[in-house]
Amino acid sequence: MKVTALDRLIGYFSPLAELRRRHVRSVLASYDAAESSRTRRFYRERATQNELVQKSGQVIRAQARHLARNHDLARGALRTLVNNVVGAKGIGIEPQPRREDGSIDSDYAAALLEAWRDWVRVPEVTHQLSFSKLQRAMARAWIRDGDVFSQMIIGPRNDLDHGTRVPLSLEAFEADLVPFDLHDERRGIVQGIERNAWGKPLAVHVLKTNPSSISQPLASDTKRIPWERVLHLASLDHIGQIRGVSEFASVITRLEDIKDYEESERVAAKIAAMLTAYVRKGTPELYVQEGASREPRQINLAPGMIIDDLGPGEEIGMIDSKRPNPNLITFRQGQLRAIAAGLGGSYSSISRDYGGTYSAQRQELVEQWIHYAVLTDDFVGQFVQPVWETFVTVAHQYGVVRMPAGLKPGSHDDAVYVAQSMPWIDPLKEALGAEALVKAGFASEVEMIRRRGANPDDVLEQIAQFRKKAVEMGLSFSTSGVEEPPPERGAEE
């Protein structure tokens, strides 16, 4: 804090007053948000992000898996994220190799696409998953666990049948097989990942067996996989972070609270449904008589019955537990909105609450879709794009699809990655809007087809084949051909 001339003057006559003045000025110059108080606890983080992940990552992963197995809301939220990021058919690919003049080499693109369609049938070593199923499995593990790995196995091997013309297979493995507690400062290994002095990953150390069956030290029971063959899908919140943390980390407590609260309300409502009555008695002198029986009575209730054998001062009462709680739905909706905000998913999709006007639903969809798009971009960049680029290179190296001469350098593996399209709430309004954009020149037909999640070349081929077949069969549809132009002026005269 700078000392002014007035401070020095005051200090000459009263040093204590100068200190008080400087202290008050320093307090006024601070941020209120940086000061803790009795009513607001302030958390001061001293550990690095990697230290926090080391301490809590495995616990969070285990709890997220537990909720995904046993809690309907958590399982539905995970399915919503996966389906909107990857979708039913996975991320589509349109090859875009370009010649020196900038035009697309359609013949080479078609050959790549044909080989790709053969490869996606059995892309992984177990031959149990198609590429779309593998994408969903990878996305599910990534969002739930925080990170997931895959190894690319290239070239013919005696112990592996690739099952496709292009000798490339993927071996996917979840985060458990890369041990968090594997550290070796001498070799630069932290949390199972080996890095150089700049922090660039060099290799991943993977357990050879399931972690539950390990009987040897971790370092001697791992295999080293070079990083150029590794695909690492991870949710990283900080620069320099090594391992990912589950997307459920910030909402786990809230999900558990909802689960416990709903269970309590469900049991309470079940008990309340068991109708129970009791006899309320008056003062003792009204019903205690000499020789009277003190055994409990059983009153059988029936519709429309009249009870006329009550004793003096007695009346029938009913047990009311005030269940179901009328505030449960409101409370649950508020909690689900907070969970949707933390996960980045749509509240309507997670809660299955589709109320509201068209404008409200579309506003939610438009604002929400950017979150899905960001997750899709991460998924494509960390998994789909490296697989495609490796596939193109391997297809050339092993003579399946050779790169033609005259390609623009570096464009051989260019592609458009077609993600899930934003759904239409009102198809008529959306279609009219798309048509207006195309006619005004603000968008192309290709862009609109891709927005629907389709391949423009496939759509054109389907339309051409349909129209050709319709003509051959003598059928006429509104889209069978181009409308005839109007007659020229004066032709009828």
Image (spheres, rainbow, N blue to C red):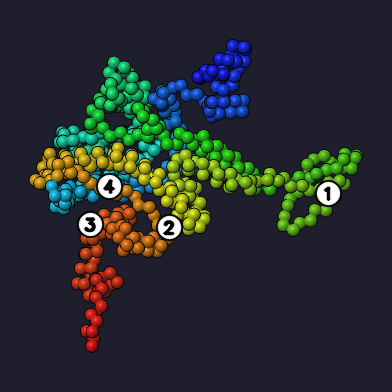
Give the mark nearest the N terminus, 2 or 3: 2
Residue 257 relative to residue 75: left or right: right
| Dots 4, 3 in contact, CB < 8 A | no
Q: CA distance from mark 2 to mark 3?
A: 26 Å
Residue to which mark 3 is pinned: 457
Name the mark nearer the viewer: 2 or 1.
2
Which residue is under mark 1? 310
Please tell me which residue is depicted at 16% across the width and 36% down the height of the picture.
Answer: 155
Q: Foreground: 361 or 252?
A: 361
Crowd rating for badge 3 (residues with CA inside 10 Å; few <14, some 14–19, many 20+): few
Which residue, as the protein is rendered here, is positioned at the far bottom?
493
- Residue of label 4: 417
**Residue 44 drawn above or below residue 441:** above
For residue 425, which numbered disc appears in the image?
2
Assign a secondary structure to mark 2: loop
Foreground mark, 4 or 1, reads 4
Give the vertical position of 256 relative to 313 (above or below): above
The quarter holding residue 196 reads top left
Q: Earlier in the sequence, mark 1 or mark 3?
A: 1
Of 326 and 306, the residue lying toward us: 326
For marks 2 and 1, the one nearer the N-term is 1
Q: Is residue 112 left or right of residue 257?
A: left
Question: As shown in the figure, which amino acid type bears the numbered disc 4?
Answer: Tyr
Disc number for residue 431: none
* Quadrant including the C terminus: bottom left
Disc 4 and disc 2 in contact, CB within 8 angstroms: no
CB contact under 8 Å: marks 4 and 1: no
Disc 1 crowd rating (10 Å Cα; few below 14, some 14-19, many 20+) is few
> Residue visible at 25% across and 59% down?
459
